[in-house]
Amino acid sequence: MDSGALRRAYSDVLAEVDAGGFGVAPAGMLGAEQIVAHLAANDEVMSEATEAVLAGAPFAYYDLAGVHRPELDALAAECGGLDGLATLLRATSQKLLTLVDRLGPAADTPVETHLREGFDLVVDEPLPWARVIDLHTRVHLPKHQAQLQTLRR
């Protein structure tokens, strides 16, 4: 499986993070640190799923929209803030990209998938893992990149 589009999507998100200058998030929205923490945590789950697919083991992928702010804040504190989170996101995304590059025909393996992207995307069914990665590339990462852009002062 070609990871080129996924690599570009991560590059775009990381460029947004590196640009900095984020203000305080409006009530009810995630702040920049929380967004980056969410992406890094989600990368870990996606890497676990990709490893399971490569091993031929069953896996159910649940997106991490339900991760609560205190958990994201704890990860941000553990990383020392936005710079540390950016370093973590670089590492987690690179791990996922490396695994995706190894998928080959296994990318078509169905994975029980549960995704929620607001009202725009709801998935509760098995999908080929390549399709989940495509949704992450074309919907999930751009959504969070746009959120970061709106937080810029």
Image (spheres, grey):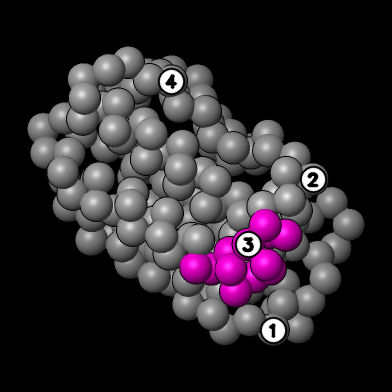
Please identify the quadrant where the N terminus is shown. Answer: top left
The secondary structure type at the circle numbered 2 is helix
Upstream in sequence: badge 1 or badge 2: 1
Tell me, for residue 79, which label it has, or none: 3
Marks 1/2 in contact by CB < 8 Å: the verdict is no
Q: Check disc 2 and report the residue beneath it.
A: 70
Dominant SS of magenta comes to: helix
Q: Check disc 1 and report the residue beneath it.
A: 21
Which callout, 3 or 4, points to the residue nearer the camera? Answer: 3
Q: Label 1 is placed on what type of residue?
A: Gly
Q: Residue 46 placed where, x, y %?
A: 41, 39
Apparent side of residue 53 relative to residue 86 in the rendered image (left or right): left
Marks 4/2 in contact by CB < 8 Å: the verdict is no
The secondary structure type at the circle numbered 1 is loop
Q: Check disc 4 and report the residue beneath it.
A: 60
Is 73 drawn above or below residue 152 in the view shown? above
Q: Label 3 is placed on what type of residue?
A: Cys
Tell me, for residue 34, which label it has, or none: none
